[in-house]
Amino acid sequence: MNSSATINQAQNKRVWALLLLLFPALLWLTILYLGSLFGLLWQSAYRLDDFSGQIVKQVGLHTILQLFTGANFDIVLRTTTMAITVTIAAAILALPLAYTMVFHAGKRQRAILYVAILAPMWFSYLVKVYGWRVLLSREGLIYWVLDKVGLAIPLDTLLHSFPAIGGASLAASFLGMFLVFLYMWLPFMVLPIVAALERVPQNMLNASADLGATPWQTFRKVTLPLTWPGIIAGGIFTFSLTLGDYIIPQVVGAPGYFIGMMVYTQQGTVGNLPLAAAFSLVPIILIMLYLSMAKRLGAFDAL
């Protein structure tokens, strides 16, 4: 009995010590972060009086329903489309790069690739965005190269002909914004895929080859399903970061607002905090739907 009591006391001490270690982080998360986030989102239940410009603190769905009106719904659709496009493109580019790093690159080559992927993340976010604005401008390097090969005028014609991707120039178009988003968030897709590929058991790959499967069949039926959780994890980053970003749409200057820009404008310049809170609900709901769909597809079964 004495020994069991001593063991229980030691376990209780470890539990209390663990709680003391976690208490600051839990306090920060539950009160300062989640509390302030809930307070912001609760504002979406209020509305702004059009005549007085004052917030009417009457709980209702008036402000949330404004998201389904023409202009606001276009903003939600435009932002969601951009986020999905960036996520798919990032996965397409990241998968072969990560596969090469894990299965074909030597230690030295892998280290170089890691540095090449991580190096842009060491520099200022604003510096990279404004640097891309210079690259995409008519006086920038991209237009200079396109002009040398005779593609500058066809590109401008394409941008003017298709409003879904176009604008006045590459620096003020959805295509230019897509390129900047893809550059900014690509490392967040590569690294989770690399981690997932490193966890693929080598004996499963060897067994697939021994059973006569071609490299493509092994990749499609063995490697890719086991890598799916890493792709989903990277997609969470690229999808959510694109949904909430407001600096890139402002700096690159594509025609039309995005969700992040509306949140920033409505809570700051306009002073319509309920509408800003309603727009803030959209990325949260979309991410929840994204995770639910990924779970239904079995993306987390290999975790």
Image (cartoon, helix red, strand yellow):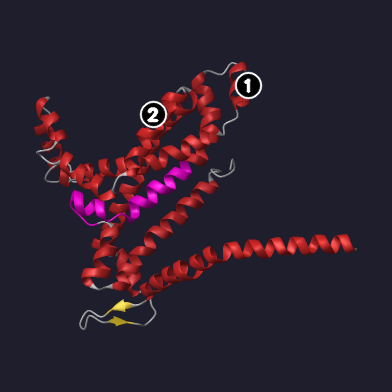
Does residue 97 appear left or right of residue 138 in this picture? right
Residue beneath the point at 51% across and 20% down? 215
Q: State the image quarter where residue 137 is shown.
A: top left
Tell us which disc is closer to us: 1 or 2.
2
Residue 65 in the image: x percent, y percent? 33, 69
Q: Residue 112 — which label?
A: 2
User: Against 138, is 279 above or below?
Assistant: below
User: Against 37, is 151 above or below?
Assistant: above
- The span shown in magenta is 231-257
Residue 302 in the image: x percent, y percent? 59, 40
Amino acid type of the residue that numbered disc 1 sits on in the rendered structure: Ala
Residue beneath the point at 17% across and 39% down? 135
Q: Residue 256 — which label?
A: none
Residue beneath the point at 41% across and 40% down? 189
User: Against 297, is 45 above or below?
Assistant: below
Q: Which quadrant of the rendered structure holds the N terminus?
A: bottom right
Q: Earlier in the sequence, mark 1 or mark 2?
A: 2
Amino acid type of the residue that numbered disc 2 sits on in the rendered structure: Ile
Which SS type dominates the magenta stretch? helix
The answer to whether the residue labelled 1 contacts the one labelled 2, judged by CB atoms less than 8 Å apart, is no
Q: State the image quarter where residue 110 is shown.
A: top left
Which residue position holds label 1? 207
Residue 18 in the image: x percent, y percent? 64, 61
Q: Does residue 232 appear in this view?
A: yes
Q: Is residue 232 magenta?
A: yes
